[in-house]
Image (cartoon, grey):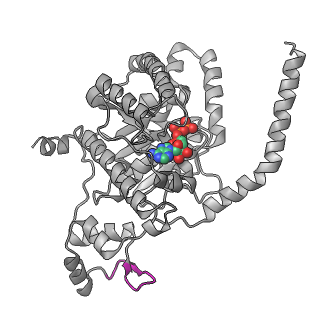
Amino acid sequence: MSINNNALSTYRLLKATAEVAEQSLAGRIQHYRAHLKTEEKELRTYTQKAAADLLGVNNRTLKRRHDQGDFDNINIKKGANGHYAYTLSNIFAMAEVLGVSADQRKEKDKLQVIVINSLKGGCGKTTSLVNIAAALATTNIKRYRIGIIDLDPQGSSSSFFPSNDHEPITVGDLMRDCIDLDEGETWEDLVSSAFQTTHIPNIRVLPSGMDDFYFEHETATELKESSSYESTRHYHKLKEKVIEPVQDEFDIILVDTAPSLNFMFYNALMASTSMLIPVHPEAVDFDANNKYLKRLGEIYHTVAALGHEGWDFMQFLVTNYVKGNHSQRDIVKDVRSAFGRQVMSYPINHSSAITASSSSFNTIFDQKTSDSLASRESLLKAQENIKDVVDELEMLIRSNWPSTQSSLAE
Ligand SMILES: Nc1ncnc2c1ncn2[C@@H]1O[C@H](COP(=O)(O)OP(=O)(O)OP(=O)(O)O)[C@@H](O)[C@H]1O
Ligand SMILES: [Mg+2]
């Protein structure tokens, strides 16, 4: 095949641009990544009052139990002010001592795999997902076991939960079967170890990596060469190779996706029990959203024909909503009148606290109010907003768990 001269120049230009970018930016990126890894990212600590609130006990009870030595086996440090500074792990250990039981899914309750997707880039998928995960994990004493799978090779959600491993196993590595098992190691062990622990004790993350892009190319090539039965297996890889081996280790898995309807996304759909579609209420975004929904229906048809069992819920989530902006308000009104209860009651509002914490790859629940680059007031407001969203999401999740269905109906 001959390449036309102009195309050849374009190709050369692209190659040269990539080289320049690598030379001039690689150092900076490496420095940044090293900083992310070695930085001992620590979750905020809690005051005694905050710990008591989270545990649902009286502050004085907590003090008394301290005096009795009931928490002596827990390594609780004191802050510079001489007061206890409780970590979330401390609080979970104290809950065991106090008999505050965890409220996770029971045997018959299905693992929830919630996929967040939209074709629109930058509509707030990652920001919403990491903050929702952090709120689910840190603002209650239920001790949900939360997994995050980063299906976007750009690795945005992984960056919020940096790994200490130099080269962590990625979701693409597992789906592409490119890791050899150690002697005596099972596939389940390998997948379990690939879900990295994070600075939030009940969140584990399966990161992505740039090589995960190859999954698209390899799948396309294999599809061309395989029989029709084999070809259908390409859509089951996330479910069968990654999620099923660890399904007993989690209550809720949140899957972040790239703004694309690629093979990774087909896999996400196949593995999903529910779907969250962020909608950024700008006219042009909304138009793109309508086209996306049409295509999503077509893709879902394929996935359903391959055995998907249907969603427990599919919800639209209005994101990055600027209160007081009339055009956004009108769009949200239209969205609500069109989709009714399928739209989450609360939007995620645009917030300077979210912008500020995202710029340093923190969720708004990671930091002490005093560490935030935004004002204390805007941080608390944003936290309250995400908590409202999460309360509704939790209701949707729990209404699909037989062990909690009856109590919710009361
Ligand atoms: N509620 C919010 N308040 C303030 N900034 C926000 C909010 N939601 C998203 N943003 C900002 O919008 C930008 C895009 O958000 P984000 O990266 O979450 O989008 P995305 O849909 O994951 O993008 P991509 O399609 O590239 O994966 C980021 O700079 C983020 O900080
Ligand atoms: Mg993203």
Q: Is residue 298 above or below residue 106?
A: above
Task: Report which quarter residue 301 is drawn in.
Answer: top left
Task: Please identify the residue farthest to the left as the structure is shown.
Answer: 410
In the rendered structure, does residue 78 fall within the stretch colored magenta? yes
Task: Residue at the far right: name it.
Answer: 5
- Give me the residue at 65% from left, 41% from top: 210
Q: Residue at x 32, y 83 (%)?
A: 72
Q: Residue at x 77, y 55 (%)?
A: 27
Magenta-drawn stretch contains 340: no
The image quadrant where one finds the N terminus is top right
- Range of magenta residues: 72-84
Q: Nearer the viewer, residue 322 or 20?
A: 322
Q: Quadrant of the C terminus?
A: top left
Q: Is residue 156 visible to us here?
A: yes
Whole-percent x and y of residue 141? 28, 60
Q: Is residue 148 visible?
A: no
How many numbered discs, if any? 0
- Hey, which quadrant is residue 215 in on the image? top right
Q: Position of residue 30 (x, y in %)?
A: 72, 55
From the viewer's side, name the closer residue of 14 and 191: 14
Which secondary structure dominates the residues rendered in magenta?
loop
- Look at the picture and state if 215 lies above or below 139: above
Residue 234, position as x, y percentages in the image: 53, 25
Q: Residue at x 22, y 71 (%)?
A: 98
Horizontal placement of 68 versus 207: left or right?
Answer: left
Query: Horizontal and vertical percent for residue 94?
Result: 29, 72
